[in-house]
Image (spheres, rainbow, N blue to C red):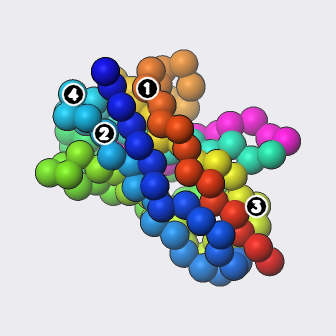
């Protein structure tokens, strides 16, 4: 059974930082695309960052590039999302997801999803 578990969300003030974590089973983590998506109230879920675990190559949505950094600890089967200079509009449920390859933000390509971790940013 493929499992993804996110952690690290919380309530912070604007300008602060958070690091989200996503731990995956070994089967999922090896040579996979691990992505972070977010779903804000009243908006569609959007992809924000992805990393290919085999090469550590990354891709970011234009809306977050420069503030979000995705990284991995292969030995821990964990992917991180460092979020700096948080803004109220970053408030959302953040989800980790796994796909066989990177390069697309199409949710259907990501077959495994975690339960999400909430990020709330106050002004």
Q: Are marks 2 and 1 in contact (CB under 8 Å)?
A: yes
Q: Quadrant of the C terminus?
A: bottom right
Q: Quadrant of the N terminus?
A: top left
Q: CA distance from mark 4 to mark 3?
A: 34 Å
Identify the residue under disc 2: 24
Q: CA distance from mark 3 to mark 1?
A: 26 Å
Q: Which residues are magenta?
A: 42-51
54 vs 38, nearest the viewer: 38
Image coordinates for residue 49, horizontal then vertical, percent: 49, 48
Q: Quadrant of residue 5?
A: top left
21 vs 62, nearest the viewer: 21
Q: Does label 4 or label 3 sit earlier along the sequence?
A: 4
Residue 46 lies within the magenta run: yes
Element at label 1: strand
Q: CA distance from mark 2 to mark 1?
A: 10 Å
Identify the residue under disc 1: 112
94 vs 115: above or below = below
Identify the residue under disc 3: 89
Please name which of the two marks, 4 or 3, marks the residue nearer to the observer.
Answer: 4
Identify the residue under disc 4: 27
Residue 36 placement, left or right of 99: right
Q: Is residue 118 visible?
A: yes
């Amino acid at each position: 059974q493929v499992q993804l578990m996110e952690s690290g969300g919380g309530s912070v003030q604007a300008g602060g930082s958070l690091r989200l974590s996503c731990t995956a089973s070994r089967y999922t983590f090896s040579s996979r695309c691990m992505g972070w998506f977010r779903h804000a109230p009243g908006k569609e879920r959007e992809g924000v960052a992805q990393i290919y675990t085999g090469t550590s190559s990354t891709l970011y949505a234009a809306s977050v590039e420069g503030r979000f950094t995705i990284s991995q600890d292969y030995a821990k089967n964990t992917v991180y999302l460092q979020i700096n200079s948080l803004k109220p509009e970053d408030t959302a449920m953040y989800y980790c997801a796994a796909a066989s390859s990177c390069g697309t933000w199409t949710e259907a390509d990501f077959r495994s999803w975690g339960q999400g971790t909430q990020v709330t940013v106050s002004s």
